[in-house]
Amino acid sequence: MIRNTLLVAACLVFVVACSATPQQPQQEPPRVSGITFIHLNDTYRVGAVEDGTAGGFGRVVTLIRELQAEGRDVRILHGGDFLYPSLESQLWNGMQIVDAFNFMDAVAPMYVVAGNHEFDPRTPDHLIDAVKASEFDWVGDNYRFATGDAETDRALHEQFVFEVDGRKVGLFGLLLQSHHRCDAPAYVDGRRDCRAPRQVPAVHVHRRRARA
């Protein structure tokens, strides 16, 4: 009986000793200097397309997290056209995309420029709702919101600057028109330099595909 008791006690001590073994802390990956930008535009669907084999914001988030795991400071840029047009937008007025952008902004800071499709409806109600629900930043330098709602009209950042590693980084957003006149609804003031230049300098970027 005493032998069995000692055996049980010895087992308990061994289990406690094993469980008390300190775990090695996970080492943070070495931080990569600079900024990694991911650029999106013309995104009308939250989920994947082509039977789930392509696209979808889930793949974008996966790519962002992979880059962050490498120690990169990731920022997301969107060049416009996301509230409209799509079947889903006819049901939710683009708010499903705003919710998705808010989720991505929580993963990495996101900055968007309005595209022409953000002004598809004749009235500004959808834009007011979208801007007020946005946790990401709207950027615009040659256009202003003129919805009549003060909070919405103030939300558009001009000459937007943020700081990384003690260095200031500037972003500017342009609403470009390919027509010979600036045709826009009354709730956006796009009269300032709104004609698109005939030529723009090429920008070479390193492309990386998201995993399927």
Image (cartoon, helix red, strand yellow):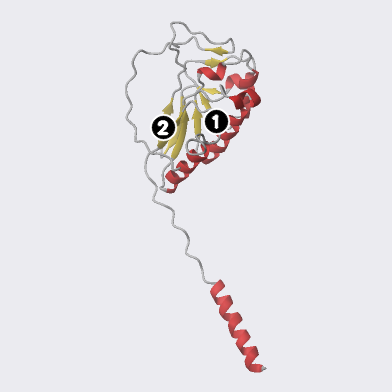
The secondary element bearing badge 2 is classed as: strand
Q: Which mark is residue 140?
A: none
| Residue at the far top in the pictured view | 181
Q: Nearer the viewer, residue 61 or 89?
A: 89
How many angstroms separate mark 2 from mark 1 (CA)? 33 Å
Q: Specify whether 1 is left or right of 157.
A: right
Instruction: Look at 41% across and 31% down and name the residue there.
Output: 169
As shown in the figure, which amino acid type bears the numbered disc 1?
A: Arg
Q: Is residue 121 above or below residue 67?
A: above
Residue 145 horizontal/vertical position (percent): 57, 16
Q: Nearer the viewer, residue 17 or 83?
A: 83
Q: Is residue 40 above or below residue 177?
A: below
As shown in the figure, which amino acid type bears the numbered disc 2?
A: Lys
Q: Quadrant of the N terminus?
A: bottom right
Instruction: Look at 53% across and 16% down and name the residue there.
Output: 144
Instruction: Look at 57% across and 16% down and name the residue there.
Output: 120
Q: Earlier in the sequence, mark 2 or mark 1?
A: 1
Residue 3 horizontal/vertical position (percent): 62, 93
Please indicate, yes or no, whether residue 115 appears anywhere in the rendered image: yes
The secondary element bearing badge 1 is classed as: loop
Residue 113 horizontal/vertical position (percent): 49, 23
Instruction: Look at 52% across and 71% down and name the residue there.
Output: 21
Quadrant assignment, res 133: top right
Q: Which mark is residue 168?
A: 2
CA neighbours of label 1 inside 10 A, class few (<14), some (14 to 19), many (20+) = many
For marks 2 and 1, give the one nearer the viewer: 1
CA neighbours of label 2 inside 10 A, class few (<14), some (14 to 19), many (20+) = few
Please indicate, yes or no, whether residue 94 appears anywhere in the rendered image: no
Q: Which mark is residue 45?
A: 1
